Amino acid sequence: MEIVSLVVAMLLAGAIGGVLAGLLGVGGGIVIVPVLEAALAFVGVDPSVRMHIAVATSLATIIPTGPSSSRRCLPLLRWPWPSRWLCRLMTRIFRTTYHVVS
């Protein structure tokens, strides 16, 4: 039963974080990190590393969402050429780094 309540808490935190990010322009981490910290405490993770894990998990979600959203939005916008060029360069650097690391 503990795992069910943990999954429900994570789903609610994700939904609330997404709504706040969309409506108020705040990062979803403002909701996700405290909920992750509480969930890790509930599971019994050592307090000395609990907050580090919560923050790292929240930041790790940026890795897939950042490049995918920029790749989706780039063709739809009419940016001045320096911004477009810089965005494409950063996307290529990310792809190369991702393939080298994985």
Image (tube, grey):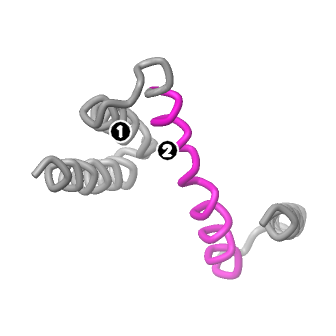
User: What's under tag 2, amino acid-wise?
Assistant: Ser
Residue 85 location (% of width, % of height) = 89, 68
Look at the numbered discs 2 and 1 and tell me whether their residues touch, using CB distance below 8 Å.
yes
Q: Which residues are magenta?
A: 51-76
Disc 1 designates what residue? 36
Closer to us: 51 or 62: 51
Near-viewer residue (75 or 98): 98
Secondary structure of the residue carrying tag 1 is: helix
Percent position of residue 42, x then y: 24, 33
Decide whether residue 64 is among the magenta residues: yes
Task: State the residue at coordinates (64%, 57%).
Answer: 63
**Mark 2 vs mark 1: which is more N-terminal?**
1
Q: Is residue 14 above or below residue 81?
A: above
**Are there few (<14), some (14-19), or many (20+) residues within 10 Å of tag 1?**
many
Mark 2 residue crowding within 10 angstroms, few (<14) / some (14–19) / many (20+)? some
The C terminus lies in which quarter of the figure? bottom right
In the image, taking residue 55 as reference, residue 85 lies left or right, namely right
Q: Position of residue 59 (x, y in %)?
A: 56, 44
Q: Is residue 63 magenta?
A: yes
Q: Residue at x 28, y 31 (%)?
A: 38
Quarter where residue 4 is shown = bottom left
In the picture, measured across the screen, residue 77 lies left or right of residue 87, that is left
Residue type beneath disc 1:
Leu
In the image, residue 14 sits, relative to residue 50, either above or below, namely below
Q: Residue at x 33, y 48 (%)?
A: 17
| Spatial separation of the CA atoms under disc 2 and disc 1 | 9 Å
Label 2 secondary element: helix
Whole-percent x, y for residue 73 in the image: 62, 74
Furthest toward the bottom, the residue is 75
